[in-house]
Every structure is written in C-alpha cells, then in structure tokens.
Image (spheres, helix red, strand yellow):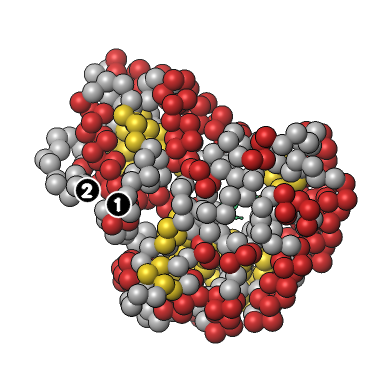
Amino acid sequence: MTSTFNTTKPQSPRRKLFIKTYGCQMNVYDSGRMADVLAPHGFETTDTPTDADMVILNTCHIREKASEKVFSELGRLKPLKEARNSNGHDMTIAVAGCVAQAEGAEITARAPFVDIVLGPQTYHRLPELVARADRKSGAVVDTEFPAEPKFDFLPAPRAEGPAAFVSVQEGCDKFCTFCVVPYTRGAEYSRPTADVLREARGLVAGGVREITLLGQNVNAYHGQGPGSAAWGLGRLIRALAEIDGLVRIRYTTSHPRDMDEELITAHRDVPQLMPFLHLPVQSGSDRILAEMNRGHTRDDYRRTIERLRANRADLALSSDFIVGFPGESERDFRDTMDLIAETTFAQAFSFKYSKRPGTPGAALKNQVPEDVKSERLTELQRVLLQQQTDFNAACMGRVMDVLLTGPGRHAGQMASRSPYLQPVHVNAPRSMVGQIVAARITSLESNSLGADLADAQAA
Ligand code: SAH
Ligand code: SF4
Ligand code: F3S
C-alpha cells in the first residue's frame, strides 16, 4: 500500500483548516492526528469555519442526537460554503468519525455538498482524499477498514502543553447489545509496545508530563512486545513509568472484564499511575448486564473494585450508566441505585438508552417508555451529583499535587488537574505552566475547585 502524505507536493497558498470534534477522547486524539497529517500539505488550523478552506466534522454516533447534531452543523456550513464559492474561494467539507463510518451513504444523500466522507481507520489517507476531492465533483467516500494500520502512516504527534493523549488500542470485539462502536471502529487492534513507547518519549521530550493512554477498550490492550509475546496494559504502564520526566499516567476507557492482576497491581506499584479510574458498569442488575452482553455480573464488578481499592486505597472512581435499557424493570433500576450507593463515585456519566440502528438492542420489543427513562435518569443523576459534591467537599483544605496545564479563567489564575482529574483553578503565575505544584484547596464550585499554592515561596 502506498501513501501520498510523505510525497510533499508544492502547495500554492496556505490553506486554513477548521476541525470540529464531537464524542469521545479518541476523536479528540484523531482530530489532532488529522491536523498533523494535513500540515505538510499547507493546512493551518483556525478556530472558526467562516474563512476556512477546509472544514472537518469529526463525528460521534453513540447516541441518536449525536448524528442529528452533525446534520444541523452541515446545514449551517452550507451557506458558508456557498458564500465562499460566490467570492471565488472554495470550502472543502469532510465528515469523519463514527457517523461517517455508519451513515456514509445517508450523508452524501442528505448533504450532497459534502466533499469527503472518511471513516476513523482511513485518516492517514486524508491528503490523497483531499487531492481527489479537488479534482472531481461529488463526494469522495472512504470508509474501508484498510489492512495497513493507520498508525504506521501518521506522523508522530507534537507536544502541545504538558498533558497529552496517546492512542494505544482501537476498536472493540465485545459487542454490547446497545453499542455501535464495534461497527464504527471495527475489530480490536493494539499498537506495538515499541511504537507507543517511542511516541511517549517524543512527547515527554517536548515537555509533556502527563499521558493518558486511550482506547475504546484500553485495558484489552495486547500489543506486540519486544519478543514475540504480547504485553498487557499493566506491563505497558510499568514500562512507561521508566521514562524520565513522565510524572503522571492515566488510561481510559476500561472494561470491567479486562481488569487483570498485572493492571490492578500497577495501581499499587506505579506511583505515576494516578488514583482515578473510569470503569463503566452501565447497570447494577445482573439480568440487564446479561441482556447487554457485558460479560460480568454486579458481584464481579464489586470484587474488582475491592481488589483495586486494596491496592490503592485512595482510588477515586468514575463510571457510565445507561437507564431504560429494553426490559429494565423498577427492580433492575433499584439494583443500579443500590450499586451506586454502596460503591460511591467521584464522577459519572449517565444516559437514557437510545436505540442505535443495527445493534441487537434496537430490535428488542420491550423498549422502556421515554417518561420512565427520564424519571429514572433524574433520580440517578441526583444521587451521582451528590456523591460528586461530597467527594469534592472532602477535598476542602487538603493539599494536593496539581499539574498546571494553562491559563485559568481569571488573570493570575492557572488551570490545573488534581490527581483525581478534578479541574482546579490555582492562583499562580503563568510562568509555572507544566509544573506539578502542591495546591491547597480553598473553594468549591459546581464543576471545579479553587486553590492557592501551598508553598507560596514556590511562586
Ligand atoms: N468502551 C466503553 C464505552 C464506550 S461508549 C465501555 O465499554 O464502557 C461510552 C458510553 O456511552 C457507554 O459507556 C455507554 O454508557 C454510553 N452508550 C453507548 N451506547 C449507548 C446507547 N445506545 N444509549 C445510551 N448510551 C449509550
Ligand atoms: Fe461499546 Fe461495549 Fe465495546 Fe464499550 S465494550 S465500546 S460499550 S461494545
Ligand atoms: Fe462516539 Fe465513536 Fe467515540 S461513536 S464515543 S466517537 S468511538
């Protein structure tokens, strides 16, 4: 397979690129990679679509409203493109990501002014697709799952600030009955350990202090190690911890089924591994967990949490919940509420079940009425919000190490992250960006904490 991105053709005027990202952190990472792959071809990113020569919508298909948002955004882009055309300019519109993968044909039918439709596995071909779109009218569509892994063809990412993502795993073989990801992202793939370590070392050399390892099922990671044996995520984290200057490591999103011993004990052995874990459970009812094809019971989840907390006592947890999966009874919902009450989460995401075309859940007859879903979601979110508020309140007066990531909301403030991934606004000068400092928590806001430097002399 040949690739065109490294055959740098002379490009006339520099072109402006606007990327809008929806959905998960994998998409955030991918948007960065798309900008990197287009940069040698004269594309510079801009933060408004108005004067852009190219607009990429990097889309998410996880819930119904997600794809409707894309069509409304396309509706807003159409007059912008027409205005540019009437001024003798062009605007290439590309739809990437999971909606592109799942609904490529619908996009070209409903929005014929779209020039390129590309799935998440073909980003390395973007320069070639742009060149093809320049030559022809009508949409260029590439939603293949190519044999060549795109990572082999993407340039190494540059460090932008002290925190970075590194994608280590993609796709999913688990087929939960509510979820589109196995269809949009394809089969599970793990990057070889040498590639991941090289990317991480490059980022750290560029000033990165914190790396979040990404994957739709990040702890199913089984990348080819230096010999023939595959490494699991726990082993990879231990190797990353050897990199001088890398002070914080996180990973997301994990599946409860893949929390193996080596990963659980990494929470004890690796001080760089932050004490915060997003471990989606979706439901607390064994019956619903089985219907969802999650492959674990409520007790399995409890035991995993116990083992994690035995290895790292201050581990804070986050989760995803779905209410109103087809057939969910009041009793099933109570099981979920009980699990929440006994586990306690520092943070959580929760959703009403939404039918995704092509998934087994969408075909089930016993769909839960919308008003029941809404009631359950309100009740569940009230409890989760209370747990989050309690967790934050318990941080008042504490001194925590925070990583200063950039300017804060007000002058004299810096944005930072606590070990538990809480956003913390610290009174500190901008010159301290990239440092890890001890901060004393002095105030609570709805979604963040306020702090002062604990050691004022550090300033
Ligand atoms: N791989 C992760 C989740 C990826 S999708 C895991 O296994 O947990 C992110 C979250 O979106 C899911 O955890 C789930 O809570 C939610 N979600 C996915 N499909 C959904 C659907 N059809 N309706 C409502 N929420 C959904
Ligand atoms: Fe979706 Fe389940 Fe795979 Fe997570 S594990 S991406 S929820 S199919
Ligand atoms: Fe959405 Fe695709 Fe991520 S459906 S959540 S963008 S994997």
* Residue for point 29% across, 41% down: 126
Residue 413 x %, y %: 53, 61
Look at mark 2 in the image and give the residue it sits on: 1
The amino acid on which the numbered mark 2 sits, given as a three-letter code, is Met
Disc 1 packing (10 Å; few <14; some 14–19; many ≥20) = few
Q: CA distance from mark 1 to mark 2?
A: 7 Å
Q: Is residue 172 visible to us here? A: yes
Viewer-side residue, 4 vs 38: 4
Viewer-side residue, 43 vs 172: 172
Q: Secondary structure at mark 2?
A: loop
* Residue for point 50% across, 75% down: 234
User: Residue 179: which numbered mark, if any?
Assistant: none
Determine the image quadrant of residue 236. bottom left
Residue 172 x %, y %: 51, 53
Q: Is residue 420 left or right of residue 138?
A: right
Q: Residue furthest bottom?
A: 269
Q: Is residue 388 left or right of residue 147?
A: right
Instruction: Determine whether 233 is above or below 4 in the image.
Output: below
> Mark 1 touching mark 2, by CB under 8 A?
yes
Q: Is residue 18 visible to us here? A: no
Residue 79 x %, y %: 41, 19
Q: Secondary structure at mark 1?
A: loop
**Nearer the N terminus, badge 1 or badge 2?**
2
Look at mark 1 in the image and give the residue it sits on: 148
Q: Residue furthest right?
A: 331
The amino acid on which the numbered mark 1 sits, given as a three-letter code, is Glu
Instruction: Determine whether 261 is above or below 365 in the image.
Output: below
Q: Is residue 459 left or right of residue 113?
A: right
* Residue for point 27% across, 20% down: 137
Residue 37 x %, y %: 28, 48
* Residue for point 60% across, 61% down: 255
Disc 2 packing (10 Å; few <14; some 14–19; many ≥20) = few
